[in-house]
Structures are given as structure tokens and as C-alpha cells.
Image (cartoon, helix red, strand yellow):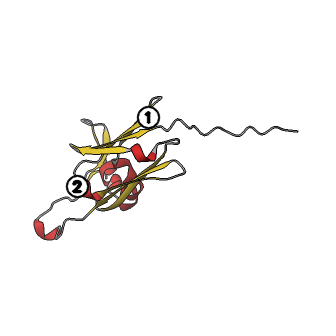
Amino acid sequence: MLGFNHHDMVPYNVNGGSFLNRFFDEPFFSMAMAGSDMKTDIKETDQNYTVAVDIPGTDKKDIALQYEDDGMLHINVSRSEEKDVEENGFIRHERTSGQNGRSYYLPGVDRASISAKYENGVLNIVLPKNGEQENDKHIEIQ
């Protein structure tokens, strides 16, 4: 039976809590949203790109960065699962474990000068530009 909770304006199931909360708890939805917990800001100036990624609750040793020749920056995070979740009295266990990652196209970077710092759950990456911007090839139509 569906009711209506006028406090938060969300339909709920009288016998089982919020319909929407239960929907978002489904395994498919959590897998689809896996990369979204790494919120990212990217800023570009004439000199560099600055990338800030929120990765709270992660140990620095579990973060891997890679910049490839094709201009792709890859950020990968490994989170290990807490052992004995059922035996430790959890009522709800939402924090994910496993691999997570994001990739961004940031061309024309001086690879040797890339720097990164992880502090207070935020990964800050500075990618200095090398001054050699790739130009689009103009194709003349005949």
C-alpha cells in the first residue's frame, strides 16, 4: 500500500519505508553510480590544468594516477571491503569496496612536471602545459 509522506513529499510504502529509498538501494543503481562518488573540479589556465577530486575515506596508497601520451589522465581507487560485515553488528552497510576510476582528456601536458597531493580527502593534481598544443588538421574539400 502506498501512502504519502507530506513532510518530505516522497511517496512511501506503509509496510516498508520510502519507495524511492528502496529503489536507490538496488544493486543495479549502485553499480551505475559507482564513478559518481569521485566528484571532480577541473580548471584550465594558460599555464596548467588543476584537477581536484573528492576521495574521502581513502588511503593515499590506494590511489593510482596515470597520464598517457594520448592526453588521458586516469585516476583509479581501490577500496577494500571491511571483513565480517555481518558479524560486526551492522544494521546498514553502504560504503562500497572494489575498484573505482575516472578518466579525463587533458592534452598538451608536460608529463615530467605533473604533481599531486592528497590531503583531507581531496586529491589535487597540477598538470603544467608544455606549450605545444595540438592543432586540428584542416581538410580542404575539393
Tell me: 122 left or right of 140.
Answer: left
Q: Local crowd at mark 1 within 10 Å, few (<14), some, or many (≥20)?
A: some
Picture layout, residue 139 above or below residue 37:
above
Which numbered tag is attached to residue 48? 1
Camera-nearest residue between 98 and 140: 140
How many callouts does the rendering have? 2
- In the rendered image, the quadrant that contains the C terminus is top right
Q: Position of residue 86 (x, y in %)?
A: 16, 69
Picture layout, residue 77 above or below residue 50:
below
Q: Residue at x 25, y 53 (%)?
A: 60
Q: Amino acid at mark 2?
A: Asp
Camera-nearest residue between 79 and 23: 79
Secondary structure of the residue carrying tag 1 is strand
Residue beneath label 2, please?
59
Q: Amino acid at mark 1?
A: Asn
**Residue contact at pointers 1 and 2, CB within 8 angstroms:** no
Q: Position of residue 104 (x, y in %)?
A: 47, 46
Picture layout, residue 85 above or below residue 111:
below
Secondary structure of the residue carrying tag 2 is loop
Q: Position of residue 16 (x, y in %)?
A: 25, 55
Q: CA distance from mark 1 to mark 2?
A: 26 Å
